[in-house]
């Protein structure tokens, strides 16, 4: 099983729109997929407090929930490095309309790894 976190707009869930910046999302949708890429479970959890300079709190919060993969449309370099250090793989999901679309694109191998080129300039 792989646990994926997707920053989401309320009410969350697989049909929710992506919250395009992980640290300012309304909630996270956690999706579990099996070795064949089939969704086995999904749940919505509240977002974690994110204040200027507190970019790493959501990293620890999601790691504590067993997240192995994060799909995001935007984040700064500091949290990206935090995810990398925690072993959570981050993929760039900008352009995906829903959580389900992002997950399906990940399963199909269509999402690039999140890199410095995708990070928000305000967070450098």
Image (spheres, grey):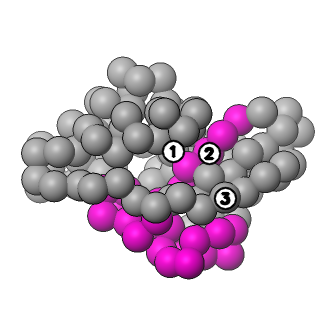
Q: Nearer the viewer, mark 3 or mark 1?
A: 3
Tell me if residue 94 comes above or below residue 89 in the rendering.
below
Q: Residue under circle 3?
A: 43
Circles 3 and 1, Cβ within 8 Å, touching? The answer is: no
Q: Which residues are magenta?
A: 2-27
Coordinates of residue 6 in the picture (x, y in percent): 54, 56
Which element is circle 1 on? Answer: strand
Residue 34 covered by magenta stretch: no
Q: Residue under circle 1?
A: 70
Quadrant position of the C terminus in the picture: top left
Coordinates of residue 42 in the picture (x, y in percent): 72, 57
Residue 93 in view of the camera: no
Residue at x-position 40% and y-position 59%: 47
Which element is circle 3 on? Answer: strand
The mark nearer the N terminus, 1 or 2, is 2
Quadrant position of the N terminus in the picture: top right
Answer with left or right where residue 66 lies relative to residue 119: right
Which element is circle 2 on? Answer: strand
Q: Which quadrant of the view contains residue 23?
A: bottom left
Q: Residue under circle 2?
A: 4
Closer to the camera in the image, 31 or 115: 31
Coordinates of residue 78 in the picture (x, y in percent): 21, 37
Tell me if residue 96 comes above or below residue 86 in the rendering.
below
Around disc 2, counting alpha carbons within 10 Å, would you say few (fewer than 14), some (14 to 19), or many (20 or more)? many
Circles 1 and 2, Cβ within 8 Å, touching? The answer is: yes
The mark nearer the N terminus, 3 or 1, is 3
């Amino acid at each position: 099983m792989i646990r994926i976190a997707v920053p989401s707009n309320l009410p969350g869930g697989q049909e929710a729109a992506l919250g395009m910046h992980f640290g300012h999302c309304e909630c996270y949708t956690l999706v579990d997929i099996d070795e064949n890429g089939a969704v086995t479970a999904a749940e919505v959890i509240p977002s974690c407090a994110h204040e200027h300079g507190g970019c790493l709190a959501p990293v620890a919060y999601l790691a504590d929930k067993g997240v192995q993969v994060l799909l995001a449309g935007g984040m700064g370099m500091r949290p990206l490095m935090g995810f990398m250090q925690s072993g959570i793989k981050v993929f760039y999901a900008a352009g995906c309309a829903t959580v389900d679309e992002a997950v399906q694109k990940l399963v199909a191998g269509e999402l690039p790894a999140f890199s410095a080129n995708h990070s928000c300039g305000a967070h450098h």
